[in-house]
Amino acid sequence: MLEVGCSEGANLIPIAYAIPGSEFVGFDLAGLPVERARGRIRDLGLRNVSIFKRDILEPFEDLGRFDYIIAHGFYAWVPEAVRDRLFELIKGLLTPAGIAFVSYNAQPVGYMRSMIRDMMMFRVEGLDDLEQRVSEGLDFLRFIVKAKPDNDIYRALLEDALKRMEARRPGVTCHDEMNDAFYPVHFLEFVRHAAQYGLAYLDEAVLPPPQDPSYKQDVRSVLEKASAGDFLKEEQLLDFVRLRAFRETLLVHADSEVHREFSPQAFRRLLFASQTTMAPAENPDSKIFVLPSNIRMESNHPAVIALLEELGKLWPSVASYADLEPKLAEKGFVLDTAGAALLIRLAVAKMLELRSWRAPVAPRIAERPRASACSRQEARMWGTATSLLHGFVTLEDVKVRRLLQLIDGSHDRNGLLEAMRTEFPDTPASELEAGIESSLNLLHRSAFLED
C-alpha cells in the first residue's frame, strides 16, 4: 500500500502495525512530520513500513507498484498541476487489479464551505501563526453568527460549521478550511479528470447511510429517467439531492473488468462481525439490538436474531459465513438474492460489519492483557489512540489514558491496580479497581487489546 501525503503516518502506521504481513510506503513533502513518523516506526520496531520526504512532482520509478494507493485529504487541497500528477502517479504505480482511494471536498456543499472559508481567510490575512489564524478565523465566524437574527438560514449554516470546526484540532481546521488551495469539485468533474489518466470509477469506500435518497424508489425513478441510464450522471444527480459535502472514491484502471452486480455467493468470501448488544423486546418473539452509538433496531426475523446474537458474543472477533451457516440454516435462511439483500440491509444499518481480513484482536480479556504497542505509543504522545480495527478514539479520561499505556502484557489485575494507585494516590483503591475493570471491557470492545 502507498499513501500519498501521509504526513506523520497517523493513518499508515496503525495499518502497518495491524497487518504485519503486508508492505506499506508513504511520502510527504513536509520534512518535520516525516521525521516524527520515522521516529514512531523506529520505536515500534516496524519493518514493513517506510515513510520518506518526497515532492510528488519528482520521478517515482524506484517505488515499484502497489495493490492499494491512498490519497486522503489531498486532491481538493492542492493546485491543478499536483492534482494532475496525482492521477498520473496512481496510473503508473497501481497494479493491474489495484484500487486507489481518493477523498475530496465535493459540490454542491463545497460552495457553502468556500463562502465560509473566504470570510475566515479575509479576516486572518497577514497572520502567519497557525493557531492564531484558526482562533481569529473562528472568532470572526462567531461574531457574524451573533450579528444574524435567530431564524436566519445563514446563521444556522455558520453555527453548524462552527460546531464542526470547534471539535477539531487547530491543525485540522487549518488544513481543511484555511489551506491556500481549496478546490471542491463535482463528482462528474472528478471522474472525468481521472478518466484523462486511464482511471475509472469503481464505487465509494463507505455504504450510503440508511436515510440516503438512493434507497428511496420514488427518488431513484426520477433520477434514472433524468440520467437516461447513465449511472455516473445518476450519481451526480444524487449528490445534488444529498447536498453532498465530501466523497471517498475508489478508482481502478479503466480497462479493469468491473462487475457491478453483487452475487449472493460473494458473502462466502467475507468475514462477519457485529458490535451490537442484545436486549429483550416487548414482543417475546423479537429482540432489540443496540449499537454503541445507541442506535437501536428491533427484529423478529429468526435468522437476523441468530446472526446478531452469535456475532455479538464474538465481537471484536469475526466469523466466516461457513461458521455461521449451520445456525442460519436452522432458522430457514438461504443465501439467495433475498438473503443477500437482507444481509446488505443489515450492513447499511451498521448492525453488520463485513470484512476481508482478521484483525489481531484478543477474543477475550487475558489475565495479563496487552493493548497494541501502537495505541500505547499514541496515548503517550497525543492522548488519542487508533484501534486494531482502525477506529480513532480521543482519550478524554486521564485514568483511561494512563491505563492504556500500562496494559503491556506484564501486569495482571493486581499489578494494574498497584500501578494506578501509584499514579493516582488520591483516588480510593475501590474506585480504581472498578475503573480498571470497566476500562478493560471498554478497551476490549473497542479493539485495542491484541491476541
Image (cartoon, rainbow, N blue to C red):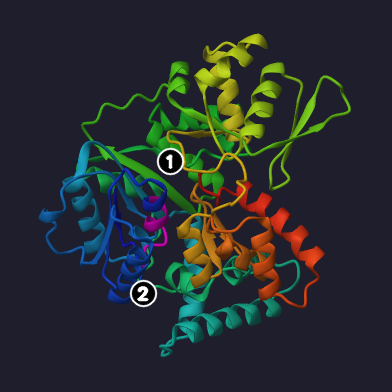
- Asked which secondary structure carries label 2, the reply is loop
Asked whether 141 or 228 is in front, the reply is 141
Q: Position of residue 361 (x, y in %)?
A: 52, 43
Labels 2 & 1 near each other (Cβ < 8 A): no
Name the residue beneath numbered marker 1. Answer: 204
Q: Which one is nearer the viewer's eye here, 308 or 153?
A: 308
Q: Position of residue 189 (x, y in %)?
A: 33, 49
What kind of element bears circle 1? strand
Dot in front, 2 or 1: 1
Please tell me which residue lies in front, 89 or 448.
448
Number of numbered tags placed on the structure image? 2
Q: On the image, numbered disc 2 is attached to which residue?
A: 180
Examine the structure image and report whether residue 10 is included in the region drawn in magenta. yes
Q: Amino acid at mark 1?
A: Glu
Q: Position of residue 443 (x, y in %)?
A: 62, 53
Rendered image quadrant of residue 136: bottom right
Q: Residue at horizontal 26%, vertical 26%?
A: 257
> Going 21% across and 31% down the picture, which residue do you hit?
255
Q: Nearer the viewer, residue 323 or 225?
A: 323
Q: Residues within 10 Å of mark 2 (few under 14, many from 20)?
A: few
**Left or right of 429 on screen, residue 34:** left
- Report the span colored magenta: 8-15
In the image, what residue type sits under mark 2?
Asp
Residue 207 showing in the rendered view:
yes
| Distance in Å between CA atoms under marks 2 and 1 | 27 Å
Q: In the figure, 366 relative to 346: above or below? A: below
